[in-house]
Amino acid sequence: MTENTPLAIIVLAAGKGTRMKSDLHKVLHPIAGRPMLMHLLASAADLAPTRQVVVAGHGRDQLEKALGESATIAVQDPQLGTAHAVQQAEDALAGFDGDVLILYGDVPFVRTATMQAMIARLHDADSPAAVVLGFEPADALQYGRVIALDGRIVKMVEHKDATEVERQCRICNSGLMALRSADLFGLLARVGNDNAQGEYYLPDVVNIAIADGRTCAVVVTDDADEVAGINSRAELAEAEGRWQQRRRGQAMADGATLTAPETVWFAWDTVLGRDVLVEPNVFFGPGVTVADHVTIHAFSHLEGATLAEGVQIGPYARLRPGARLEEKAKIGNFVEVKNATLHKGAKANHLTYLGDADVGAGANIGAGTITCNYDGYFKHKTVIGERAFIGSNSALIAPIKIGADAIVAAGSAVSRDVGDGELRMVRAEQLVKPGWADRFHDAMKKKKAEKKG
């Protein structure tokens, strides 16, 4: 891509995705917590395209909601093939003069470098009319073929229309293509549908350009997985697995320890620092940032959480969106944190729910403590001061403030603020009846014996 040449992206996403058997548009199915279409657009964004057009059919409303103002939606109805689909972007690109990159919404993991290579080839000295992205799969299956000599395309052919000799070609067509806007729509207008499927095939623009005496070129990716399409739930799971495997390798290369890598699941935006220890069966949802020297014990679930240096969580901990743990804070087993901050050195080691709370530095939250943050209509905040001690099985009924160095006695249900350094004990008076239990047991044993008799 030349520095001054604008770029437009056309993403084809008009397929019905019937093999998915889903009410959700195929390209919006998530991988690592992010819709596959957004993975693709994120890679394309590094090329700074000036226009983005997504060609939709079924599920247009879902795409409009997901994309917002980031792309123009063009509609293909009826759906008469890939060349016809690209034609629907002509109005959206009216007045555009530059390069056009054609991508597929269900092929989400095309690398930015691969896109760059296609655009760069378009600007080589031989000035090809079109650049096709090819790949060499282990099994060529039903893919169309790119018949090429020294990187220059001789012929493009769909599998159903190929001869047996042509099917021996190892270079397959990914469907991705780069052209100049000045060439694209003129070539598309000349595409016919005299083929086995009766459709307007996008690869025919290459054959038309070649017949005109123009050069067309192929760029072959060294990773067939990056152009793997996703058409079913099984293929979606396979793509997720490949993504996770690469991400685990990256995490370890960057200095994290995963004791059982195959059991750790990352989100697309997970950030891990150095010397982080992640034990088995940990799940990262979107929005998690982990600083250096953090330990995440087994069977923990994190989403929308920020962990500062030296934090420890788990095992069996759950951090929900808005959880913020400052330096050396600790969350133990079966503790849930949501929209709450634990300041430096604060800890909740067992069986606790902390929601809409601010826990001061050095505070200790006893087992079974609950911040009662919801009254059925509104959420309310609990503020716990520095070095406060909250006894086990306490209920803190928000809105409430517990002062610094205060103590809440075990078993208390606290509904009013506690001052700095105070002890608050909220319990019913203990009732003692000497001998009552002995008399009860004697009576019950006698009754049971009479019943058996």
Image (spheres, rainbow, N blue to C red):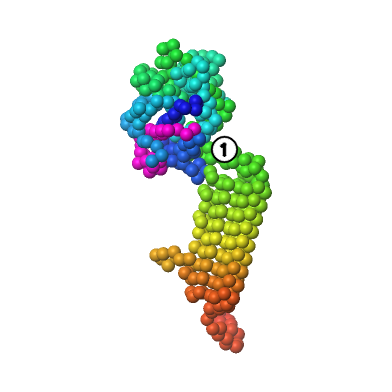
In what element is the residue under mark 1? Answer: helix
Q: In the image as oriented, which residue stretches furthest toward the front?
A: 4
Quadrant position of residue 312: bottom right
- Between 288 and 126, the residue placed more toward the observer is 126
- Between 429 and 100, the residue placed more toward the observer is 100
Picture layout, residue 95 above or below residue 233: above
Q: Is residue 452 visible?
A: no
Picture layout, residue 405 above or below residue 201: below
Picture layout, residue 164 above or below residue 75: above
> Residue visible at 41% across and 15% down?
208
Place of residue 321 in the rendered image (x, y in percent of width and height, measured from the top left): 50, 55
| Magenta extent | 47-68
Place of residue 330 in the rendered image (x, y in percent of width and height, measured from the top left): 62, 60
* Residue tagged 1: 242
> Residue visible at 57% across and 87% down?
433
Place of residue 380 in the rendered image (x, y in percent of width and height, measured from the top left): 45, 66
Magenta stretch contains residue 312: no
Number of numbered labels in the structure image: 1
Please state, as top left, top right, bottom left or bottom right, where the C terminus lies in the image. bottom right
